[in-house]
Every structure is written in C-alpha cells, then in structure tokens.
C-alpha cells in the first residue's frame, strides 16, 4: 500500500524523484509545501494536481468526478450497483471507463477526501452523496479573492478555473457533451445544494439584484422559487 501511494504521489507530481531520492515537488505553491500549512491544504493541493494542472494521467479520473457531480443530488446513484445502472442508461461506459466496483470505490474515497461528496448509511448500506459543500467552504477566500461581493457568474467562472469539475470547466463540459447540457443559466443541483447549505450555515448570502443577470439554482424535482434566482453572492467571512 505504501509503495502504491508513493507511486501515485510521484505520478501526480506531489513528489519528485531525483538521484534515487524522493522529495516534495519544489514547484508546488509555497503554502502547499509550508510545514505548518501543507497537511491542512493537502486536499486542495491534490485537487489542483489532479484536475487543474493539465495532468493528462488523471483526465479519466477528472471525467468520472465531473460526471458524478453532474448528477441530480436528490436522486444520485449512491452505490456501485446504482452507478453501474446509470452509466449503462446514459451510455457513457466507454467515455468514463467506469468498469468495476473497484474503480467506484477509488472514486468514492477520493471524492469524500477532496470534499466533493460525503457518505451515510441507508438501510444498513453505505451510500454516497455528490455534495461539494466542503470544497466550496475551504476555498471561499480564494474564490472571492479579496472581495466581499461578486456576481454569481463570476463565482462560477472562478470556480471552474480553480477546479474544472464544475460548470463551464473542462471536465464538466466534456461530461455534458455526453449526457446533455443543463438548461440555460441553470446550475447543477449539486452546486446549487452546496450554495444553499453555505447560506444556511451563514458563510455566504445569495442575492438577486434588479437589472442584473441571473443564474438559476434548482431544488428537488428541478423546482425553482424566488430564492433560487440569484445574481450576486456575498461572502460573510473575513474582510480584506
């Protein structure tokens, strides 16, 4: 297991191998290799290395994660059997290369660790939910980048650049080309759910301003109410 983890860490460029020695990649962001910050930031460091660094070795994994986040959070496949059935129904088996329960377990473990999903037990069986709230919460400071208020469109664009699993990002667009695109200006239910959760937790405030472009945050059964028509997001955290 240790050797497998070591090989994967070198493969994704978290570590480098030189002169028969293994060391932390010095080209990582300074905070990522800071002894006081590195462990806490490791999930985001992995996210960058897997998805946002043009790492061709991890592109299949990126497509799988983007596919899972694109599913309806209120009816998402939570077990391997359900994933297998949905992959077949959507005819994306060759595209995703999701061919065994072992690959699902790997996706499941990584998505939970990176903050894109969480798990619970239902009827005695472990079930996974595609919910990126934890990832959003960790990265609000970077997404707002010194501002307290930005448009929802700006938020989504920054999010996709930082992690292309989300709407308009490279991997999400590849997935939507396979399973069908969202309605115009709609967010996926997993993204919308995470934003609603963060608002409930007091981390952000979602607002609709007159004469501003709106994005739609759907709820269960793709229902939309006045609270789901959003133009701006206000960060309630630290001020610049």
Image (cartoon, helix red, strand yellow):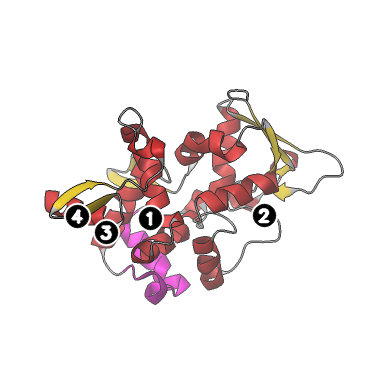
Give the number of the mark in front: 3 or 1. Answer: 3
Q: Which residue is mark 1?
A: 50
Q: Which residue is mark 2?
A: 186
Give the number of the mark in front: 3 or 4. Answer: 4
Q: Earlier in the sequence, mark 3 or mark 4?
A: 3
Q: Residue at x 34, y 33 (%)?
A: 34
Q: Which residue is mark 3?
A: 11
Q: Earlier in the sequence, mark 4 or mark 1?
A: 4
Could you tell me how far apart the alpha carbons at marks 3 and 4 are, in whole angstroms?
A: 14 Å
Give the number of the mark in front: 4 or 2. Answer: 4
Residue 118 shows in the view: no
Q: Residue furthest front?
A: 19
Q: Is residue 199 above or below residue 230?
A: above
Highlighted range, magenta: 79-98
Confirm whether the magenta stretch covers residue 86.
Answer: yes
Could you tell me how far apart the alpha carbons at marks 4 and 2 are, in whole angstroms?
A: 48 Å
Q: Is residue 49 above or below residue 226?
A: below
Query: Alpha-carbon neighbours of circle 3 within 10 Å: few (<14), some, or many (≥20)?
Result: some
Give the number of the mark in front: 2 or 1. Answer: 1
Q: Nearer the viewer, residue 100 or 116?
A: 116
Query: Alpha-carbon neighbours of circle 4 within 10 Å: few (<14), some, or many (≥20)?
Result: few
Confirm whether the magenta stretch covers residue 237.
Answer: no
Q: Which image quadrant for residue 62?
A: bottom left
Q: Which residue is mark 4?
A: 18
Q: Earlier in the sequence, mark 3 or mark 1?
A: 3
Main SS, magenta region, reads helix
């Amino acid at each position: 297991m240790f050797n497998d983890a070591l090989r994967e860490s070198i493969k994704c460029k978290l570590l480098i191998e030189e002169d028969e020695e293994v060391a932390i990649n010095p080209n990582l962001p300074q905070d990522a290799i800071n002894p006081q910050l590195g462990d806490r930031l490791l999930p985001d460091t992995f996210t960058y290395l897997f998805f946002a660094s043009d790492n061709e070795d991890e592109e299949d994994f990126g497509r799988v994660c983007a596919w899972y986040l694109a599913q309806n959070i209120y009816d998402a496949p939570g077990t391997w059997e359900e994933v297998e059935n949905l992959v077949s129904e959507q005819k994306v088996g060759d595209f995703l290369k999701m061919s065994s329960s072992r690959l699902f377990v790997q996706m499941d473990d990584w998505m939970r660790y990176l903050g894109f999903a969480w798990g619970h037990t239902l009827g005695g069986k472990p079930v996974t939910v595609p919910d990126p709230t934890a990832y959003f919460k960790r990265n609000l400071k970077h997404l707002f980048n010194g501002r307290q208020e930005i448009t929802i469109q700006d938020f989504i664009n920054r999010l996709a650049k930082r992690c292309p699993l989300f709407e308009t990002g490279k991997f999400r667009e590849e997935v939507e080309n396979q399973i069908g695109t969202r309605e115009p200006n709609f967010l996926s239910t997993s993204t919308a759910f995470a934003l609603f959760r963060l608002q409930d937790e007091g981390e952000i405030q979602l607002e609709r301003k007159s004469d501003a472009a709106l994005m739609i945050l759907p709820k269960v059964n793709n229902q939309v109410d006045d609270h789901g028509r959003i133009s701006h997001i206000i960060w309630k955290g630290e001020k610049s």
